[in-house]
């Protein structure tokens, strides 16, 4: 499957030449891709380089090294953005205009024919629940209402790829539910989503793949299962009818938890888990379940980022 | 391409209307015109007394003063519009919503310029209608010469707009405004500085003055165009080179603005 969005060795260095030559690596060697139909979560703490990455992906910034491709094209090319919908964290609209006027403007820029455009605008205004506020200037909207309008403009051209930066920012719980519902609906209809969010429980509920970045570098990446799977260790659930295996293991200091019909062992190390599996099988035990014990995305994120920061501080001291 | 440029231009024009820049310009123009109302009163008085000779002498003076005054106002307006439209989009962040759409940066710059130009044209249209009404009222309707003079002033405003738009990409509004006035009127500024130095008994070689004025040839071109029009010279072979010079300059500035803007890093910061 050809990726809709690709970043290959993407780097951005900001340099100040005056009054002194100084430079700052906002992004270093970032490589990832977004495939058709998936929700791709792009996570990182504040200042990690998420916004810089999005700016590069949409052609607002020029990369210092590496390249990115949108639908196989340089994002600075006009055609590359034809099938993209973008929602920034705090969308800046012209405050004196109403929602239909602004959506009409964006629709014209996207070349949507007038009858279809007007119909789509009505649909979207209803979808994001702005019908009652449609005659009010956007400058008088609350933050949540502006965010709803931002979502509407991002969906105007029925995009194949959505780039969303904190889509639930400024929303109350009902608004958040609306966004989550909408994202699931879009995913089902085959839209790919590049999602930046700090609300990791929501991300975990809907995303397929994850990249965690910190200080401009990739810390962890992979499918959601692989990212969450390598955390607390491994769990072995087995059945031991005679009880011989359990006695033998307990004699060697392995902690065994008694379940209703089975027994459970949890270990941190994978090699240790493999050794125990062999031992259980050799002793006549039956393996009911063997799996990595997952963490929540939030735990993974905090452990990764906090770990890096602690190591960096240790180096400095 | 055309529909995207016109969409940006239309929105730029509507933004200018809403921002009341045009309204402020019109009020400023009316206030300055009030300063010249003495001449109008003199014309009306002469007409009432049946002194046609006096009327014939005063009418051109009134027209030229009004055009000169309104020309200055429209150039100031064009400069303000030029330094405002793109810079405001960049600082407020509205530019990101637009450039995330399939719009090239060239189309965006062209649309902003065109929207600003439409605003200036509307100011001139209002002025021309008012002047036409006054001129008809005092029995001296506007002719092709007057139209040509107004057109030359509109060209000058378009030039100021291009310069201001270009400079607003790199400088803040005040800096861009001052520099664009210098860029458009550079030759005159150099000449005036040389005159002041001369008055202070400091001899500035003519070659140096010419060299310093060289990057700003447009003032001379525009002065030449105005001079011909004041002499009622409407011959195309004498007007066209001067017109072409001003138009060339405006388009070159616009193109340089595009080149600057094309690869400019637009940094959308996280909130």
Image (cartoon, coloured by chain):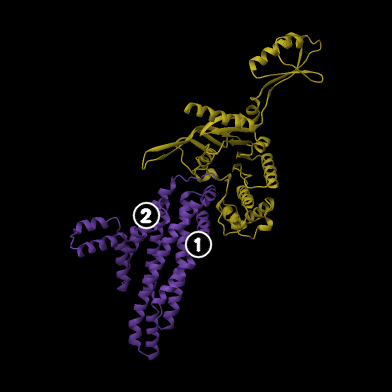
Tell me how far mark 1 sits from mark 2, CA to CA.
24 Å
Q: Quadrant of residue B248?
A: bottom left
Q: Are marks 1 and 2 on the same chain?
A: yes
Q: Which mark is residue B127?
A: none
Which sits in the foreground, A112 or B99? B99
Residue at figure coordinates x 65%, y 52% from the top left: A120
User: Which colour denotes chain A?
Assistant: yellow
- Vertical relation: B83 (above or below) B56: above
Helix, strand or loop at disc 1? Answer: helix
- Whether residue B222 is visible, yes or no, is yes
Query: Label 1: which residue?
Result: B16
Tell me the crowding category of disc 1: few under 14, some 14 to 19, or many 20 or more residues within 10 angstroms, Cα based: some
Residue closer to the observer: A40 or A49:
A49
Q: Quadrant of the N terminus of chain A?
A: top right
Q: Colour of chain B?
A: purple
Picture layout, residue A125 above or below residue B42: above
Observer able to see residue B237: no
- Identified at 26% across, 63% down, the residue is B192
Residue A150 picture location, percent across and down:
61, 49
Side of A28 where A90 appears, left or right = right
Residue A53: give x, y in percent of width and height: 52, 38
Q: Position of residue B91 (x, y in %)?
A: 48, 52
Chain of the residue under label 1? B
User: Closer to the camera, B153 or A134?
Assistant: A134
**How many numbered marks, from 0 up?**
2
The residue carrying mark 2 is B252
Instruction: Give the mark nearest the N terminus, 1 or 2.
Output: 1
Q: Is residue A143 above or below residue B151?
A: above
């Amino acid at each position: 499957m050809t990726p809709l969005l690709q970043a290959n060795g993407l780097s951005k260095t900001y340099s100040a030449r005056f009054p002194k030559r100084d430079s700052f690596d906002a992004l270093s060697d970032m490589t990832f891709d977004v495939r058709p139909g998936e929700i791709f979560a792009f996570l990182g703490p504040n200042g990690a380089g998420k916004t810089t990455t999005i700016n590069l992906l949409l052609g607002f910034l020029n990369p210092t090294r590496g390249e990115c491709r949108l639908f196989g094209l340089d994002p600075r090319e006009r055609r590359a953005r034809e099938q993209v919908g973008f929602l920034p964290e705090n969308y800046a609209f012209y405050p004196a205009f109403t929602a239909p006027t602004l959506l009409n403007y964006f629709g014209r820029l996207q070349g949507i024919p007038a009858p279809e455009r007007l119909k789509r605008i009505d649909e979207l205004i209803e979808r994001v629940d702005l019908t009652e506020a449609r005659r009010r200037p956007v400058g008088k909207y609350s933050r949540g209402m502006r965010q709803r309008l931002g979502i509407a403009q991002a969906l105007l051209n029925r995009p194949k790829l959505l780039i969303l930066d904190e889509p639930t920012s400024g929303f109350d719980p009902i608004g958040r539910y609306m966004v989550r519902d909408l994202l699931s609906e879009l995913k089902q209809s085959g839209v790919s989503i590049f999602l930046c969010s700090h609300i990791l429980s929501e991300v975990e509920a809907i995303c397929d793949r994850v990249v965690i970045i910190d200080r401009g570098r990739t810390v962890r990446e992979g499918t959601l299962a692989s990212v969450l799977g390598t955390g607390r260790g491994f769990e072995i659930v087995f059945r031991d009818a005679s009880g011989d295996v359990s006695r033998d293991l307990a004699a060697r200091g392995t902690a065994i938890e008694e379940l209703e019909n089975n027994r459970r062992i949890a270990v941190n190390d994978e090699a240790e888990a493999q050794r125990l599996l062999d031992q259980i099988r050799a002793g006549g035990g039956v393996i009911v379940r063997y799996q990595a014990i997952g963490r929540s995305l939030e735990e993974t994120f905090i452990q990764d980022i906090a770990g890096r920061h602690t190591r960096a501080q240790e180096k400095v001291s | 391409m055309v529909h995207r440029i016109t969409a940006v231009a239309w929105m730029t024009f509507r933004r200018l209307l809403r921002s009341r820049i045009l309204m402020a310009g019109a009020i400023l123009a009316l206030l300055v015109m009030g300063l010249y109302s003495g001449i109008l009163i003199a014309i009306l008085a002469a007409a009432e007394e049946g002194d046609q000779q006096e009327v014939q002498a005063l009418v051109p003076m009134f027209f030229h003063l009004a055009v000169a005054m309104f020309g200055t106002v429209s150039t100031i307006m064009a400069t303000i519009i030029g330094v405002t439209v793109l810079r405001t989009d960049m600082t407020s962040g509205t530019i990101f919503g637009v450039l995330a759409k399939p719009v090239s940066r060239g189309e965006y710059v062209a649309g902003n310029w065109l929207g600003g130009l439409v605003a200036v044209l509307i100011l001139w249209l209002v002025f021309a209608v008012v002047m036409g009404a006054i001129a008809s009222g005092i029995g001296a309707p506007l002719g092709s010469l007057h139209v040509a003079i107004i057109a030359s002033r509109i060209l000058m405003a378009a030039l100021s707009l291009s310069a201001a738009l270009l400079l607003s990409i790199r400088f803040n509004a005040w800096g861009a405004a001052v520099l664009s006035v210098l860029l458009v009127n550079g030759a005159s500024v150099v000449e005036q500085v040389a005159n002041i130095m001369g008055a202070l008994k400091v001899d500035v070689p003519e070659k140096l003055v010419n060299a310093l004025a060289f990057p700003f040839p447009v003032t001379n071109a525009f002065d030449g165009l105005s001079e011909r029009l004041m002499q009622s010279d409407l011959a195309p072979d004498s007007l066209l080179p001067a017109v072409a010079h001003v138009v060339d300059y405006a388009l070159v500035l616009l193109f340089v603005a595009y080149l600057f803007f094309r690869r400019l890093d637009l940094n959308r910061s996280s909130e």
